[in-house]
Image: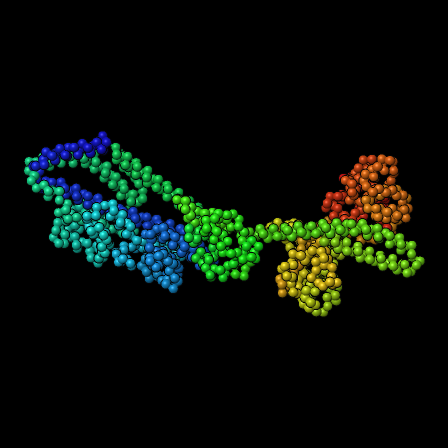
């Protein structure tokens, strides 16, 4: 039978007995029925009040343990243990403390029961690091100024808290003070726990002061307010009195045993039950005492009293009971109590014990054997507790994960409330913009300046990302720059999203700042490399065409010089023209040097020896005002480079350094072995990771202004006056180093000097010096040569020289014409063709096509570009012979004989 049915049956029987005995029951019989139930009610209410107080203490303990786990506490400890700076996030101890103040204030804003936080270090006499309370104007939350911070070394709470171990929390005795504004009693309690460093030592003590008025308000709202309640210490002394529905200040020096001696004597051995006794004024009082050891470790009791006269009020109304009816009612009450005690009292008592044990230990163990509504109630309570525990665990896990995720983000994250105040910022945001309370202030504006995306134009305040976010705007990747003091401009991209309240109104915004400084620098380097590449292609093309022209002029001058050898005046003119052509050829070599297309003769060289030999030439060249200091590396690896080009580059750099020092200063030349890793190679164009030989040229001259540092390697760029230089010096050094497979870096500070580092690849064992034997004398021949050249002047020049050398020459202006001549049966011993031909087929393709008909065809290529450039472009193979333009008759004759006399012709590609 269900509990509701049993109760209905019992109440029906009780009402029947009551109606039958209404005129017969006596006053005393009804009194005996009323008093026990009233005493039982008092006992249950006292237990419930003590249980509610215990539940509040457990919540307070959980609040303290959660607050102790704030990531910012660990940040303060790391910063303090590492000289004031957190090595993990780069924040100072002061910045972490300011962040803690914001977190404390935020918690107090949403939890009015928290009266204040205090974090005091165990060092320096318990000096307070930070305090937050509600003593601001009008009870507002405030951060206590540094001048008002106290020392807690002699405070009992501080001392006891620093002695706690594990997850222990110290609870201070209950204190009741008058509210500062209303003067009403304010019950308070202080919780304290140690903050430990990674080694387990106590670093500081965290204290939280809590207002107990909400706890007692809930007790008053739920339970009967017509009784008097005293919260007492088990061994004596009042903690708090609750009289007439309001809190009354207790008198801790008085002992409750002295005020209620009969209660102490009758219930000392069996707390948790109720009795009737005489009060201090002699009136009879019904009272109950409940004692228990609470979460704070103190044995605390609750005394609940009620005048017996009030409890007996129902019996007073019935003063005419009869003895017989009383006896029958008594017998019925006994029988009914016996039945109900078995069916109702036992499961209720079991549930009460289970709930009491849960309030003490936090573990819920429901009794077995329950039935009906008792079983349903137990299952429902069990499920509710399980859901609450699971929800709390999930919430803690998600909160910790979210805090760690945001704290570890490389992007700066800031959360603004509806008023535009920053309520949250991750460590990256604090490091970028400083403390939250300073942002927007005059002091902050003096330290930080905001710019538009160009990094120069100041950003108006109303266009800043924070201002736009406060207006409720959502946007993506708004670029801006920010400068802290005299530091460099940090390029940022800001994105924001508004936060809406449940009713759709504006509740704040989230702003995310991404650092684009490294990306912008990489973009600038890429543009610079592309510009240098474009200039190199332009100069290479100009030099190629100029070489064609110089080839004709060079050959013509040789012929004219031979023709006027008997006329001195014209012979001198021819010599002058030949010198001019030579200078023009040097100019094209300079252009090809920058475009990395000049012919090189790399070999294994000792850079130390080359540097020392060059210094001997530099000392008289630079003048006595330049002090030259040399620091060669003793274990320098041999480098793979053209020694003459490297010497010219070194002289060029030294002369530029002399000009920068105005003829007076110090020039430092040094060498060394350097390993450039993959990370460095990824940041610099055309650099391969590996070991390099480094040659450094440093001066203490005027330095290079930042505005032109990116242009110093451009051809024809110079800061010298007109007529004092062509501007090809540094560009030739740049091209030589790049063509040699090396790297060049320039470091300069205006007013302090310049350093240029040359990185050359190390030579391997298989690298040998170039053959320096003198070339054989130019000879002619009787073979037949097919000349394919699309430039008419060059073609005419070649035909003239070939005939002068005794060869039979055939000419074609394109690959198609040459193929036509072959089809017509023109026979020849050698194909002499330009690599670059117009008409859709170049020289190597023509050679491949002709080898289909003449497999052993001998081929000599010519081009305004060099062999190195042709190889890199894939125009020719490594075994093919190339005659660079411009060339003289002797060069042409020597190369023709080399190819014609070679027994093994170059293989087809």
| Residue appearing at x 68%, y 68% in the figure | 664
Q: What residue occupies the far top of the structure in this picture?
A: 1
| Residue appearing at x 66%, y 64% in the figure | 699
Q: Residue 153: where, in percent of width, then height?
A: 35, 61
Residue 755 sits in which quadrant? bottom right
Front in this rendered view, residue 640 or 278? 278
Quadrant, the C terminus: top right
Q: Is residue 727 above or below residue 853?
A: below
| Residue appearing at x 19%, y 48% in the figure | 226
Q: What residue occupies the far right of the structure in this picture?
A: 566
Q: Is residue 68 left or right of residue 698?
A: left
Q: Is residue 400 visible?
A: no
Q: What residue occupies the far bottom of the structure in this picture?
A: 624
Residue 327 sits in which quadrant? top left
Front in this rendered view, residue 356 or 726? 726
Residue 713 sits in which quadrant? bottom right
Q: How many numbered marks, from 0 up?
A: 0
| Residue appearing at x 18%, y 49% in the figure | 305
Q: Residue 498: where, in percent of width, then height?
A: 45, 47
């Amino acid at each position: 039978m269900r509990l509701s049915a049993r109760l209905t049956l019992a109440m029906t029987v009780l009402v029947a007995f009551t109606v039958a005995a209404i005129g017969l029951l006596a006053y005393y019989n009804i009194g005996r029925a009323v008093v026990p139930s009233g005493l039982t009610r008092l006992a249950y209410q006292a237990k419930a009040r003590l249980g509610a107080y215990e539940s509040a203490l457990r919540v307070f303990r959980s609040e303290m343990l959660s607050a102790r786990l704030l990531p910012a506490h660990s940040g303060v400890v790391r910063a303090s243990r590492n000289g004031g700076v957190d090595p993990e996030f780069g924040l100072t101890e002061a910045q972490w403390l300011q962040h803690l103040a914001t977190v404390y204030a935020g918690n107090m804003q949403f939890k009015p029961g928290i009266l204040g936080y205090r974090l005091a270090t165990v060092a320096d006499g318990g000096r307070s690091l930070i305090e937050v309370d509600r003593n601001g104007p009008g009870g507002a939350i405030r951060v206590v100024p540094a001048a008002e911070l106290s020392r807690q070394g002699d405070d009992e709470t501080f001392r006891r808290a620093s002695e706690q171990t594990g997850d222990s929390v110290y609870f201070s005795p209950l204190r009741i003070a008058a509210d500062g504004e209303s003067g009403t009693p304010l019950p308070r309690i202080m919780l304290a726990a140690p903050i430990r460093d990674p080694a387990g030592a106590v670093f500081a003590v965290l204290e939280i002061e809590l207002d107990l008025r909400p706890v007692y308000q809930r007790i008053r709202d739920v339970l009967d307010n017509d009784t008097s309640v005293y919260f007492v210490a088990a061994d004596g002394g009042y903690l708090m009195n609750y009289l007439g529905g309001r809190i009354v200040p207790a008198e801790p020096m008085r002992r409750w045993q002295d005020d209620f001696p009969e209660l102490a004597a009758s219930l000392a051995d069996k707390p948790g039950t109720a009795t009737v006794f005489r009060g201090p004024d002699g009136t009879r009082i019904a009272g109950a005492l409940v004692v228990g050891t609470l979460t704070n470790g103190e044995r605390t009791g609750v005394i609940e009293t009620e005048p017996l006269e009030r409890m007996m009020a129902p019996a007073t109304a019935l003063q005419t009971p009869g003895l017989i009816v009383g006896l029958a009612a008594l017998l019925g009450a006994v029988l009914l109590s016996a039945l109900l005690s078995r069916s109702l009292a036992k499961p209720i008592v079991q549930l009460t014990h289970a709930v009491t044990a849960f309030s003490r230990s936090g573990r819920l163990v429901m009794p077995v054997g329950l039935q009906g509504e008792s079983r349903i109630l137990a299952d429902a309570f069990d499920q509710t507790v399980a859901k609450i525990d699971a929800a709390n665990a999930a919430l803690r896990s998600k909160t910790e994960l979210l805090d760690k995720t945001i704290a570890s983000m490389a992007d700066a994250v800031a959360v603004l409330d509806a008023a535009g105040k920053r309520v949250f910022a991750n460590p990256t945001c604090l490091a970028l913009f400083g403390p939250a309370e300073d942002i927007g202030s005059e002091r902050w504006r003096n330290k930080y300046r905001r710019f538009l995306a160009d990094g120069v134009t100041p950003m108006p305040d109303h266009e800043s990302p924070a201002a736009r976010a406060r207006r409720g705007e959502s946007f993506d990747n708004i670029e801006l720059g920010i400068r802290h003091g005299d530091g460099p401009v940090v390029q940022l991209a800001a994105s924001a999203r508004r936060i809406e309240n449940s009713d759709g109104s504006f509740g704040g915004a989230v702003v995310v700042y991404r650092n684009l400084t490294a990306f912008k620098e990489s973009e600038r380097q890429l543009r610079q490399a592309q510009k240098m590449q474009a200039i190199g292609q332009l100069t290479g093309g100009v030099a190629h065409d100029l070489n064609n022209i110089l080839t004709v002029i060079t050959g013509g001058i040789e012929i004219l010089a031979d023709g006027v050898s008997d006329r001195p005046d014209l012979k001198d003119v021819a010599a002058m023209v030949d010198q001019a052509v030579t200078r023009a050829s040097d100019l094209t070599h300079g252009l090809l040097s920058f475009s990395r297309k000049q012919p090189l003769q790399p070999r294994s060289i000792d850079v130390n020896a080359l540097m020392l030999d060059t210094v001997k030439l530099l000392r008289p060249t630079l003048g006595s005002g330049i002090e030259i200091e040399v620091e060669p590396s003793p274990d320098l690896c041999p480098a793979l480079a053209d020694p003459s080009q490297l010497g010219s580059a070194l002289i060029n750099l030294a002369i530029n350094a002399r000009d920068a020092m105005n003829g007076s200063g110090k020039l430092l030349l040094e060498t060394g072995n350097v390993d450039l890793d993959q990370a460095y190679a990824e940041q610099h164009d055309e650099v391969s990771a590996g070991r390099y030989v480094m040659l450094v040229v440093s001066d203490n001259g005027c330095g290079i202004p930042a505005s032109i540092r990116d242009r110093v390697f451009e051809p024809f760029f110079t800061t010298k006056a007109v007529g004092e230089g062509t501007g090809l010096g540094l560009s030739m050094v740049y091209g030589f180093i790049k063509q040699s497979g090396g790297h060049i870096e320039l470091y300069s500070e205006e007013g302090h000097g310049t350093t240029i580092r040359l990185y050359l690849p190390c030579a391997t064992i298989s690298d040998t010096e170039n053959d320096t034997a003198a070339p054989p004398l130019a000879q002619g021949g009787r073979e037949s040569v097919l000349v394919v050249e699309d430039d008419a002047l060059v073609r005419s020049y070649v035909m003239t020289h070939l005939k002068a050398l005794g060869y039979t020459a055939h000419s074609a202006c394109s690959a198609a014409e040459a193929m036509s001549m072959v089809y017509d049966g023109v026979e020849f011993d050698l194909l002499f063709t330009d690599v670059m031909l117009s008409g859709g087929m170049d020289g190597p393709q023509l050679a491949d096509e002709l080898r289909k008909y003449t497999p052993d065809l001998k081929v000599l290529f010519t081009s305004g570009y060099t062999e190195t450039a042709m190889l890199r472009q894939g125009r020719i193979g490594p075994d093919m012979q190339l005659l660079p333009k411009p060339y003289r008759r002797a060069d042409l004759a020597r190369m023709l004989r080399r190819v014609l006399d070679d027994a093994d012709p170059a293989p087809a590609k």
